[in-house]
Amino acid sequence: MNPLTRRHKYYKISLLFIYVIVLLKTAWITDDAYITFRSIENFIHGYGLVHNVGERVQTFTHPLWFFILSGANYIFQKVLLLDYWSQMYFTDVFISIILSITTVLLIALLIAKSSLGAILALIILISSRAFMDYSTSGLENPLTHLLFAFFLYVLFEDRWPKLNKILMLSFIAGLGILNRLDTFLLYLPPLLFEISKSKQKIRNMIFIMLGFTPIILWELFSLFYYGTFFPNTAYAKLNTGISRTALLKQGLLYFSDSFLMDPLTLLSVLGVVIFILYKKQRKLMPIVGSILLYMAYILYIGGDFMSGRFFSSLVLATAVILSQISYKEKHTAYGILIVLALVLGLLNNTAPLRAPLNYGGGNVRNYINHSGISDERAYYFRRLGLLSLERENEIPGSRYSGKDWIYNAEKRSVEIIGPMGVDGYHLGPNVHVIDWNSLADPLMSRLPLIDTFQWRIGHFRHQIPEGYLETLSSGVNKIHDKSVAKYYDKLKFIVRGDLFNPDRILEIIKFNLGKYDYLIDSYSFSRINLVI
């Protein structure tokens, strides 16, 4: 090995070591992860894939991530009998860390065409707040990153026969979409590109359908079990009545926030897109297509309330593209890119490289800007950071976790809460939890907002019909509005009725065809007129 190659290898190993240190230093869990924790507890204790016992409502948006965490926690709780109060927290954090390290090793050791490409990719990833913040967080991002990186590895690998390669790519994409539905947009351009290169398009489509088996099976199960193809959170966040213009404006604010708080991420993403389009590098064009399509989607839906979260996969794609370019040791452009990435990563006082172990603190409201977008890690790190110097012992877990997660119908009560993550988990299985944003409630999520002009992205307050809380508490329909009451009876039969009742299957079909929408449309109309 010549001295130059040895030096590059040393740099690469050093950067991998730095990545692990920064990853451990910034590891944390967000409040939203506890929404999934509650469903996992119900699932592994035999109450179903539900948020509230007795009501089939899907509040988690990442089925594959849900099943991985459920499997791990089942083994710890039921097989190894390792029940302790914060087990769910530590299991999530350490699985995230393992997946994230695997992703970065995959990029640095297998995907990158050279050590120089790997070095640049590693510096981009370590310096990107979006990528590092969501390399943990308790959400599905680490698994999304790993699956997308593996997809790109197979895409660039030429050892597989074309048909087998398409089947493999489709299967990985199917798992990725099962992990998060909207990542379909990331996988679509490369798959279409692979199909276009072959003359056997019909056979390729068959292979794609075979590869998509995981997500197809889940959607069929979801329709049967929950009565819908999509999680309840989709209805709560998309069924708002907010104008598209307002959402597009919010989407622009999301891009602006990322540029101000994490300039490296957007600058590197946009710079790479422009470069590849200018150079017309056919091999990398499909990945640019993925980036542009997903950016358009982010803009269309109004972005997110978690700063940078939706850009984490895009900066990963950018790092992979940069790792595929051939560089010379004294290439001026390469040196400029390295310096620029390091400068942006070190000068930004919110960047992972500079973040202290007491990151955040003070008035947590300071971390939510005027457009409702928050620095989530700053908001939660002191309470829920892995190495936080101030983490409160009572927060990561719950006295109801593990063997104490036992449902008793006689002790059942109903509570409406604000953020329903940690608070909902701490209330345990005997409390039927609903929140103002209707993430866990199938009726509220389909009703209009309290105010379509005053809202925070990702936190849309839906109306609560008069008599609804009494209905949930008593089990008897006491909703005042007759149309909504009738609609709820139909909905209740789907989410609470006998799973295998043939009439229920018929109601699911009618429900998804919109046969009962008129019942809540009339409610919406009357409420709007009342306000006017």
Image (cartoon, grey):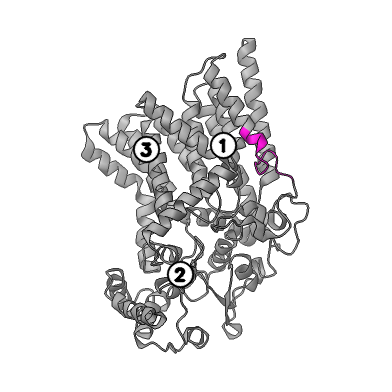
Q: Nearer the viewer, mark 2 or mark 1?
A: 1
Q: Residue at x 40, y 68 (%)?
A: 226
Residue 279 falls left or right of residue 311 = left
Residue type, label 1: Leu
Crowd band around label 3 with a 10 angstrom C-alpha radius: few (<14), some (14–19), many (20+):
many
Secondary structure beneath dot 1 equals helix
Q: Nearer the viewer, mark 3 or mark 2?
A: 3
Which quarter of the picture shows residue 223?
bottom left
Decide: marks 1, 3 in contact (CB < 8 A)?
no
Q: Residue at x 40, y 79 (%)?
A: 492
Vertical side of 86 occupied by 199: above or below: above
Q: Residue at x 41, y 45 (%)?
A: 294
Secondary structure beneath dot 2 equals loop
Does label 2 or label 1 sit earlier along the sequence?
2
Q: How far separated are the C-alphas under marks 1 and 3?
A: 20 Å
- What span is in magenta? 344-356
Which quarter of the picture shows residue 243?
bottom left
User: Looking at the figure, which quarter contains the C terminus?
Assistant: bottom left
- Report the predominant secondary structure element of the magenta stretch: loop
Crowd band around label 1 with a 10 angstrom C-alpha radius: few (<14), some (14–19), many (20+):
many
Residue type, label 2: Val
Decide: marks 2, 1 in contact (CB < 8 A)?
no
Residue 46 shows in this picture: yes
Residue 292 magenta: no
Q: Residue furthest right?
A: 389
Residue located beneath label 3 in the image: 289
Q: Viewer-proximal residue, 43 or 446? A: 446
Residue located beneath label 2 in the image: 57
Vertical side of 168 occupied by 179: above or below: below
Secondary structure beneath dot 3 equals helix
Residue 389 image offset from top left, x and y in percent: 78, 52
Residue located beneath label 1 in the image: 264
